[in-house]
Amino acid sequence: EPVIGVLAMQGAVREHVAMLEEAGARAKPVRRAGELSEVDGLVLPGGESTTMSKLLETFELLEPLKARIAEGMPAFGSCAGMILLARQTLDGRPDQQQLGGLDVVVRRNAFGRQVDSFEADLGFAGVDGNVHAVFIRAPWVEKAGDGVEVLATVSGVPGVDDDTARIVAVRQGAVLATAFHPELTPDVRVHRLFVDLARKAA
Ligand code: GLN
């Protein structure tokens, strides 16, 4: 079984660990650069993306993590994790760091100008039926490069006037990202998708 790290700076670390184990991986929290070499893939939880990028610098994880991702380490970011994995953030703070790995431009707190949080049932490529998606001050993907597969979109969000379908889940190679929080539901299928990506990459 693949060993999947969960970046343990802030956010729903325990929830991701539990989901990964249920999805067939061995999961372990990652706080130091040395621990990065012990994992086959990494989950970047939600939280606050600017704070997380500062903590990554403080713990001297930013450059090692960038390097591992550039080498092709599988990664799964939810919400703030998606922001970190993007190549560029719109409406981010000036000191926002990007890990890269996803050729996307994200907009931070994209729905939040109208609504803070909402839930929706979404179709998700590679998963049968709907996925219940919990959005908390979520970003969306504003622009996706040619190599990026769109896995899910959302539209008709209550309180949002604009009905445009917004991209909220993407994959590029073994890098997966969701603007929402699968770790906050009992549905383990998105984590299973990621564990399968990591297993194939190993
Ligand atoms: N709004 C947060 C940010 O900008 C993300 C929120 C979340 O991860 N739930 O980083």
Image (cartoon, grey):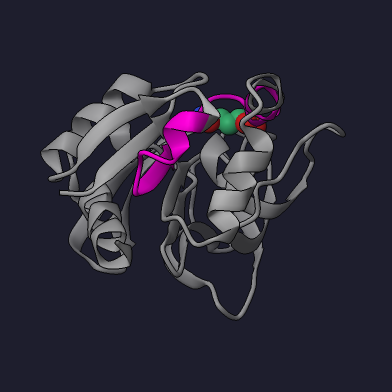
Tell me which image quadrant ligand 1 sits in. Answer: top right
Residue beneath the point at 59% across and 63% down: 164
Indicate the quadrant containing the C terminus: top left, top right, bottom left or bottom right: bottom left
Q: Position of residue 46 (x, y in %)?
A: 49, 31
Q: Position of residue 40 (x, y in %)?
A: 34, 49
Q: Position of residue 85 (x, y in %)?
A: 59, 49
11 or 40: which is nearer to us?
Answer: 40
Residue beneath the point at 26% across and 47% down: 191
Question: In the orientation shown, which residue stands out farthest toward the right?
Answer: 94
Q: Is residue 36 magenta?
A: yes
46 or 43: which is nearer to us?
Answer: 43
Indicate the quadrant where residue 25 lies.
top left
Classify 197 as above or below 49. Answer: below
Residue beneath the point at 53% across and 63% down: 165
Looking at the image, can residue 68 be seen? yes
Classify 128 as above or below 34. Answer: below
Looking at the image, can residue 45 be seen? no
Horizontal side, residue 58 vs residue 78: left or right: right
Span highlighted in magenta in the image: 34-53
Classify 184 as above or below 191. Answer: above
Horizontal side, residue 26 vs residue 202: left or right: left
Indicate the quadrant where residue 110 lies.
top right
Horizontal side, residue 3 vs residue 86: left or right: left
71 or 133: which is nearer to us?
Answer: 71
Indicate the quadrant where residue 185 lies.
top left
Horizontal side, residue 45 vs residue 109: left or right: left
Q: Is residue 82 magenta?
A: no
